[in-house]
């Protein structure tokens, strides 16, 4: 049976840390669906369409990946996609508490689903979408933090770029 996993997240925007998890999980599962969350309590910088577009441009070289977006409960979406596994990345202990809670509630909602955690690559342990936005806002270079298609989206949003400094 083909193994299908869903990697959900805000991806606001996608970073090299996300790409690392996507590349690695694509070697574990037959197919990985990268799913952009329509929203929660966070106020995103990018629209869902922009986040999907950045992902498409960034990871189109990986063959067994699908990029999608969803609304509502994650477990319903995962079932709808006929997947059995949720992929999440862990950076530090600070991620652990939230992720444990989320995995526990998802198991309660659907005991058939498993959450699969991947430890961050050490070089990306400090990296988050929030840090990237902070750096871009002050016109500093984000070239090492995000995939090549992403900086232009960030600088356009903030109306500036490192060359303006
Ligand atoms: P969310 O709002 O769902 O946390 P994010 O886009 O911030 O969405 O993160 C999506 C997933 O990617 C989460 O499981 C998060 O822990 C993981 N992740 C984010 N940055 C990194 C990184 N640098 N290394 C490994 N995993 C990461």
Image (cartoon, rainbow, N blue to C red):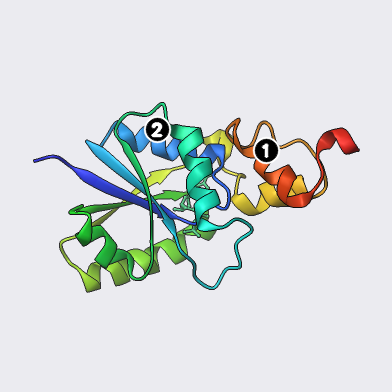
Within 8 Å: ligand 1 and the Cβ of disc 2? no
Tag 2 or tag 1, which sits nearer the N-term?
A: 2
Q: Position of residue 162 (x, y in %)?
A: 83, 36
- Who's the residue at 68% across and 38% down the image? 152
Q: Which of the pair 140/120 is nearer the observer?
A: 140
Q: Which of the pair 100/57 is nearer the observer?
A: 57
> Callout 1 environment at 10 Å: few (<14), some (14 to 19), or many (20+)?
many
- Who's the residue at 66% across and 43% down the image? 153
The quadrant holding residue 37 is bottom left
To which residue does mark 2 refer?
Answer: 23
Q: Position of residue 59 (x, y in %)?
A: 45, 33
* Residue 11 visible (yes or no): no
Q: Which of the pair 72/132 is nearer the observer?
A: 72
**In this figure, what is the number of numbered marks?**
2
To which residue does mark 1 refer?
Answer: 151
Q: Which of the pair 160/88 is nearer the observer?
A: 160
Question: Which quadrant does the C terminus fall into?
Answer: top right
The quadrant holding residue 9 is bottom left
- Who's the residue at 53% across and 42% down the image? 54
Determine the secondary structure under disc 2: helix
């Amino acid at each position: 049976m083909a193994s299908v996993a869903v990697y959900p997240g805000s991806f606001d925007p996608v970073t090299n840390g996300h790409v690392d998890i996507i590349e690695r999980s694509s070697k574990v599962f037959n197919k990985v669906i990268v799913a952009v969350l329509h929203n929660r309590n966070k106020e995103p910088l990018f629209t869902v369409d922009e986040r999907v577009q950045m992902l498409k441009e960034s990871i189109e070289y990986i063959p067994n990946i699908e990029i999608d977006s969803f609304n509502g409960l994650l477990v319903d979406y995962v079932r709808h996609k006929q997947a059995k596994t949720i992929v999440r990345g862990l950076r530090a202990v600070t991620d652990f508490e939230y992720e444990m809670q989320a995995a526990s509630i998802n198991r309660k909602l659907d005991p058939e689903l498993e959450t699969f955690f991947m430890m961050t690559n050490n070089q990306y342990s400090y990296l988050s979408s929030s840090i990237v936005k902070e750096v871009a806002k002050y016109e500093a270079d984000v070239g090492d933090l995000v995939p090549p298609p992403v900086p232009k989206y960030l600088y356009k949003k903030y109306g500036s770029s490192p060359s303006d400094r």
